[in-house]
Image: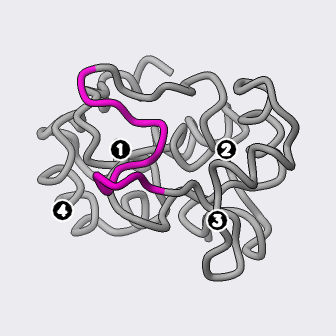
Amino acid sequence: MEAETSLFDCRMCGHCCEGKGGIVVSPADLTRLAACLRVSPATAARDYCENSGGKLKIRTGDDGYCLFFRSGRGCLVHDGKPAICRAWPFFRGNLEDPLSLEMAKEFCPGIEPAADHATFSDAGRRYLRENGLLASNSQCEANALILK
C-alpha cells in the first residue's frame, strides 16, 4: 500500500464527488452504506440513491455534488462509501490508458504529477486486488472497476 499512498493523497477537493450518475452502488456497497447510516438497505436506497442506466447510484444534491460530500470536510460516510469511491483514482481507464491518467492528473490534485503510467498501473492494480475492489458484474457494479 506504500506505493499507492505515494501516488495518491486525497486532498478532499471534491472533484471526484461532483456530477450526476457516477457513483454506482453495488449490493455490497448498499449493505455497507446502510450500516454506516444505521438504516436498512431499503431505506438507504430509497433516501439516498436513484436508479440510472440500470444501476443504483448515489443521488446528487442541488449543488451537483454527491449527497454525502461536504466542502472542507470531505465524505460524511467515509467508512461506508461505495467501492467506486474507495478505488479512485485507480479506475480502469487510468490503469490501462496513459492519456487517461494524464487527464486525471489535471483533474485531481491528489494524484502525484510525476507518476509514470507503468508504476501507477501496477500499484493501482495491486491496490484494487488487495482491497477487494475489483468488480466482475457489469449489471450492478461500476464498470471502471472491471479490468481486462
Give the Cα distance between marks 4 and 2.
22 Å
**Disc 3 or 2, which lies upstream in sequence?**
3
Q: Secondary structure at mark 3?
A: strand
Instruction: Give the foreground label among 2 and 1.
Output: 2
Q: Secondary structure at mark 4?
A: helix
- Tag 1 secondary structure: helix
- Which residue matches tag 2? 133
Q: Secondary structure at mark 2?
A: loop
Identity, as a three-letter code, of the amino acid under mark 3: Glu
Residue 13 belongs to the span the image colors magenta: no
Identified by mark 1, the residue type is Phe
Stretch in magenta: 60-72
Give residue 116's position: percent from left, percent from top: 22, 47
**Mark positioned earlier in the residue sequence (4 or 3):** 3
What type is the residue that disc 4 sits on? Met
Name which residue lies at 71% across and 80% down: 54
Circle 3 is placed at which residue position?
Answer: 50
Is residue 70 shown in magenta? yes
User: First in sequence: mark 4 or mark 2?
Assistant: 4
Tag 2: amino acid:
Leu
Residue 67 lies, with reference to residue 11, above or below; the image says below
Write the residue at 54% across / 37% down.
86
Which quadrant of the figure has residue 46?
Answer: bottom right
Q: Which residue is mark 1?
A: 120
Q: Residue at x 35, y 50 (%)?
A: 65
- Left or right of 48, for residue 13: left
